[in-house]
Image (tube, grey):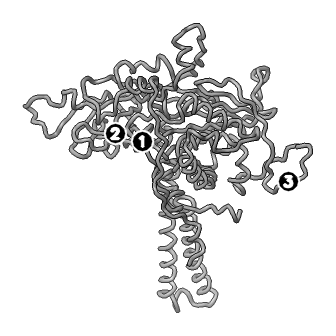
Amino acid sequence: MDPLSLLVPRARPSLPLPLRAASPATSSARAAAPAPRRWRQRARLPSPVSAVAAEAPSAPSPSGGEEKEKEKEEGQFDWLDQWYPLAPVCDLDPGAPHGKTVLGLRVVAWYDRAVDEWRVFDDACPHRLAPLSEGRIDDKGRLQCVYHGWCFDGRGSCQFIPQAPALGPPVHKNSKACVASYPSVVQNNILWFYPRADEEHQDILQRKRPPFIPEIDDPSFVTVYGVRDLPYGYDVLVENLMDPAHVPYAHKGLMGKLRKKEDPGRVEFDVEGGGPVKMKIAEADIAGFLSEQDNSGYFRYVAPCTFYGSPLPKEEKGQEKKKKKPPQFMLVFMCVPVSPGKSRVIWAFPRNVGVWLDKVIPRWYYHIGQNAILDSDIYLLHIEERNFAAAGIENWQKAVYVPTSSDNMVIAFRNWFRKHCKSQVGWAAPTVGQLPETPTKDKLMERYWSHVTQCRSCSAALKGMKALEVALQIASVAVVGFLAVAKGTLVTSVVQRAAVVSLAVLCFAASRWLASFIEKNFYFQDYVHAYK
């Protein structure tokens, strides 16, 4: 038996998610939201809201004198009254539609050339509910369903039904032929959408915007973007990102050793360099919380998706007037609930140091290391989620033991999730109340569908490397063929023959090395903690 096969987990039966009766607040929130397009009657055509954020929006200030605002702050979190990120704009091809799932809702993002804006629709053609994300942008800049050719403009109205007679009734103008269009906005170079398509929510941009990170739009900063689909749920994703103590252990060998901090009285140290992490939680409410790190950095959680901060001290007001800004590096994560047991992380890492590196290092090269970090704890978190489900996610505080301050952010998030969400995501569409089965490791940690197909930089790099691999193989065969033909004529000496053979071997070896590089960095590479 191959010893490596022992590391591959067997498939396990699906575990049920904890079910609960919906609270009045949650029920009213869901009732106010429209059902997805394929379940909703097409009564009217809402006009879309789409814009590009030109400046930083002002942060909403709490108005304690208003009873309505106070009730909302103390009540249940409304998952449908939020903005959700779809993808970095740099990873969206304007020449094709892009299908995404958010909150259990299948949507399609496409570029409307008529107004130079991105649109977000229900991913279901009103004709026979075929996915519009498998369609195309026609020669008139409309979204075309490739099942029967129906075409839609940026408002979601049907413009052309090929099967309808030209002199017949204008069936394409019927409201049932329309597809729901969601409010959308490009902010911080990321496409966001609001999961309510009713007419009353089309002015949502006037009321609230997505969280704004000024450093991303600062011209003195450069930002590396990325996206990855993950085989574990939203709450596990957020919890993991808020846990700095796991870094030297779960990501051993990938991020370097952390500096050992002074810990009076400690007599035992490990090679990983772990130690106490002091943090203090502040400003905790329904909108999220702030975590102040040990004498330096900070992190802020803006519910439900955005988690950002820096391990470096904040820039002081007096330093803003100086011509030379101090080195700044930020971590910005956007955590997207996809469906039970599945989530998506979009990251943006703005910095004002080493700016020149982005001119020589392609984005896909950064992604190699970033994907390796995600791979190193995928299996841990996938199984951890199933252990939580078996214990009952509502019993999280009883099932775990978190005695140190390094878990303060995790505890703060779990308290928020329990208090304001009753430990459940408010899905926008019906979902199956169970976690998916655990696949083998090669499927659990695969990179191609979870990242490469969603990243234009990695897709282009993979295409180029595959072409180079084929070229090297052809070159090795061609060199051997040349040696056979030219033997005794052009290639006469032993030295010449040895040089030609060496060139053929070198080309073949290079093609094999490149094939291994492609497999490990664009498809699958296992991470065995025992040997790190």
As measured in the structure, the alpha-carbon distance from the residue carrying label 1 to the one carrying label 2 is 8 Å
x and y, in percent, of residue 315 in the image = 75, 27
Kind of residue at disc 3 = Phe
Is disc 2 surrounded by few (<14), some (14 to 19) or many (20+) residues within 10 Å? many
Read off the residue under disc 1: 100
Q: Is residue 344 left or right of residue 354?
A: left
As measured in the structure, the alpha-carbon distance from the residue carrying label 3 to the one carrying label 1 is 46 Å
Q: Secondary structure at mark 2?
A: loop
338 or 476, nearer to the observer? 338
**Residue in the image at 48% along x and 29% along y:** 79
Read off the residue under disc 3: 269
Quarter of the image where the C terminus is located: bottom right
x and y, in percent, of residue 525 in the image = 58, 62
Kind of residue at disc 1 = Lys
359 or 415, nearer to the observer? 415
* Corner quadrant of residue 354: top right
362 or 270, nearer to the observer? 270
Q: Nearer the viewer, mark 3 or mark 1?
A: 3
Quarter of the image where the N terminus is located: bottom right
Kind of residue at disc 2 = Asp
* CB atoms of marks 3 and 1 within 8 Å: no
Read off the residue under disc 2: 123
User: Count of labels shown?
Assistant: 3
x and y, in percent, of residue 266 in the image = 89, 48
Which of the numbered marks, if any, corresponds to residue 350? none
**Residue in the image at 65% along x and 25% along y:** 284
x and y, in percent, of residue 472 in the image = 52, 71
Is disc 3 surrounded by few (<14), some (14 to 19) or many (20+) residues within 10 Å? few
Q: Nearer the viewer, mark 2 or mark 3?
A: 3
